[in-house]
Image (spheres, rainbow, N blue to C red):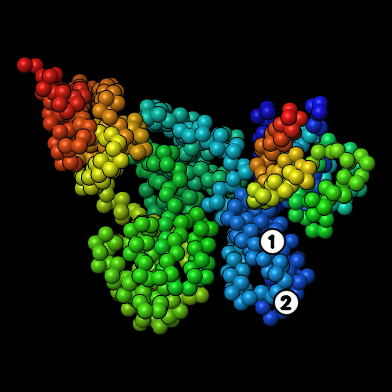
Amino acid sequence: MTRAALNRVLLVEDDLDIQSVAQLALEAVGGFVVEICSSGSEALDTAPKFCPDLVILDVMMPGMNGPGTLRALRELPDMVETPVIFMTAKAQRHEVEHYLELGALGVITKPFDPMTLSATINSIWSQHYAA
Amino acid sequence: MPPDTTYSVQDQLDELRQAYIAGLSARVDQLTSVWNTLSPEAWDTSALETMLQLIHKLAGSGATFGFTSLSNTAHTIERYLLDIQERNDPLTSEEYTQISALMEVVRMVAKDPTQHASTLAWKPYLTLNQHLSGAHSRLVYLVEDDLLLARELALELEQSGYTVRTFAHPRELEQVVHDAPPAVIVMDIMFAEDRLAGITGIAQIRQFREVTIPVLFISARNDLPARLHAVRVGGVAYFTKPIDVPRLIEQLDQLTVSPRPEPYRVLIVDDDQVLAEYYALILQQRDMVAKIITDPLHVMVGLVDFQPDLILMDLYMPDWNGLELAAVIRQQQTFVGIPIVFLSTETNLDKQLAAIKLGGDDFLTKPIQPERLIASVVARVQRSRTLQSYMMRDGLTGLLNHTTMKELLSTEVARAQRQATPLTLAILDIDNFKQVNDTLGHTAGDWVLKRLARLLQQRLRATDIIGRYGGDEFAVILPNTDAMVARQIFEEICQDFAHIQQPDDSTTIPITCSCGIAAFSDDHDSNSLNEAADSALYGAKRAGRNRVVPAGAQEQSMPT
């Protein structure tokens, strides 16, 4: 696979406070173009219009959870191959493996450091495309 | 990343955090009202689901904004709730008690979030602050309108390895403190227009900064109101002019060398596991380390292994009560000084007094308010640690005293023997100290002793054990160090000491020190090691002073 540029990031996270920290971390520190959705169903609506390079999905959300949202996104023609990173608190190793099996590029644990979040994402991204 | 971006991001993060703090109590109120609808009797799966969502959010967001232990507590509640949800049964009464206790901790944090954040340290943002403080860990801001005094003091501090920036007025400090926080602020109190301008200035800075920078006040005022004002804005020390500079430097060293004191260690003795865990959680919220013992018979083992600063003990336990246990603990010399705080439902004052008479230091009545528990524990541990340090340390230099050194030397010798690791003992004394005292006076003599003490503290590792045997004799235990390395270290120290600034510019007496070192080997015990180092020191004196002589070498280095 050729190395793709990472520019547009769609963040799906239900907690408003974490949304704002993540937005700041991704926009001001990382320089990404960011769109935010507060739920899985909102993401299904927004994703095809926004055409993200990467989707960051919170694992536990009310209604449609992270893995559920990923499955639903994959049903959309434009989103069949869009890379996804999960975000979760205190993930056990087998849980992380499970998320990777679902097709995620990586798992970011909460709390994240807003100063290094973008660097972490970039390194997951380039590791994936280097392989 | 250009620094400007970093700072503005930092500012924005600070704002977000403020907003989070502002909304925290509403979050917790909501959580509480849902929890109040749940009990073993009143069971409602949809309320459980709501509770789970709220607590999950709290677990996720708390740590993001620096409330790490709030997150941990919320996460523990979440695990309980998930278990309950999975087995699809009502709460057991034990679960109800546990979760209620945890909820109490959550409410305690929410009630006064900033206070908890400052003790918890705000992790995500620390990367930046740590970086700054790492680079400037010896940066001191000195605010003093007497420019001559400022220059002199700055010079002295710089000689002791600090970087000093001076300011003529507190208001000049505001922006700079924000952009490049120093390790310590040294602040004068009186300025031309206001006899308390220094205090007001610090109060203003504190208003906008969560991360508290330690402040030392210096002042010509020695009145109680000024001192009280200084304490009120969080001053950690107060020096009256003329300033005792070595003591000021000592204080700076203490503040900059080990910014984090050892966490307080509390041994909880209570036969009720759930309650004990609740107390432990409250104490852990304030970064203390707690160990729980539910069987009173294990208390002695706990004391020895855990080495607590304080014992928190239930008064009524099956078989053995707390009073008897306290009496047994107090009968052992090592634990005579350890604070014991009793917990009980006992409200009878006579019985409470009886408990205190038998060796208790305080009596807390159940149910215990978290704040009350914390206050009682913190106050007692602080005092007992201070007393301990007085007992162990030499008043003039702050180094360990002879008794303590002797104890530690035998511990370290035993360790070196057991682990087959090298160990070296160095004994130093000041050359012709009597002449220094006689010519320059005792004040100058004390100054010289303090200078050597400081030099040793600066040059040696944190693991080296430094003490003053008495008079002008010092000793250093260097674990994991052989004689050759020790010799190099002390040769440098002796050379530096010979070049240190004299107490009085007109002095012409050379001030130097000599040092004898001895490495531990199997035919030594702590006494003979001490003797070997001492006779090596004697060898250094006879060989002409201002030098280091290893044990066994003095015979060859001696003129025949």
Camera sees residue B3:
yes
Instruction: Name the residue rendered at 51%, 34% in the picture.
Output: B134
Instruction: Name the residue rendered at 74%, 47% in the picture.
Output: A99
Camera sees residue B30:
no
Q: Is residue B59 above or below residue A6?
A: below
Instruction: Tell which of B84 and B165 is nearer to you.
Output: B84
Where disc 2 sits, the SS reads loop
Q: Chain of mark 1?
A: B
Instruction: Please indicate whether residue B145 sits to the left or right of residue A99 in the image.
Output: left
Q: Which mark is residue B221?
A: none
Q: Earlier in the sequence, mark 1 or mark 2?
A: 2
Instruction: Tell which of B14 and B529 is nearer to you.
Output: B529
Instruction: Please indicate whether residue B351 sits to the left or right of residue B49 in the image.
Output: left
Instruction: Tell which of B133 and B32 is nearer to you.
Output: B32
Q: How many angstroms separate mark 1 from mark 2 (CA)? A: 18 Å
Quarter placement of the N terminus of chain B: top right
Residue tagged 2: B43
Instruction: Name the residue rendered at 62%, 73% in the picture.
Output: B96
Q: Callout 2: few (<14), some (14-19), or many (20+) C-alpha neighbours within 10 Å?
A: some
Instruction: Please indicate whether residue A17 sits to the left or right of residue B426 in the image.
Output: right
Give yes or no for contact between labels 1 and 2 (Cβ–Cβ under 8 Å): no
Q: Is residue B336 above or below residue A111?
A: below
Q: Callout 1: few (<14), some (14-19), or many (20+) C-alpha neighbours within 10 Å?
A: many
Residue tagged 1: B55
Quarter of the image holding residue B53? bottom right
Q: Chain of mark 2?
A: B
What's the residue type where badge 1 is placed?
A: Ile
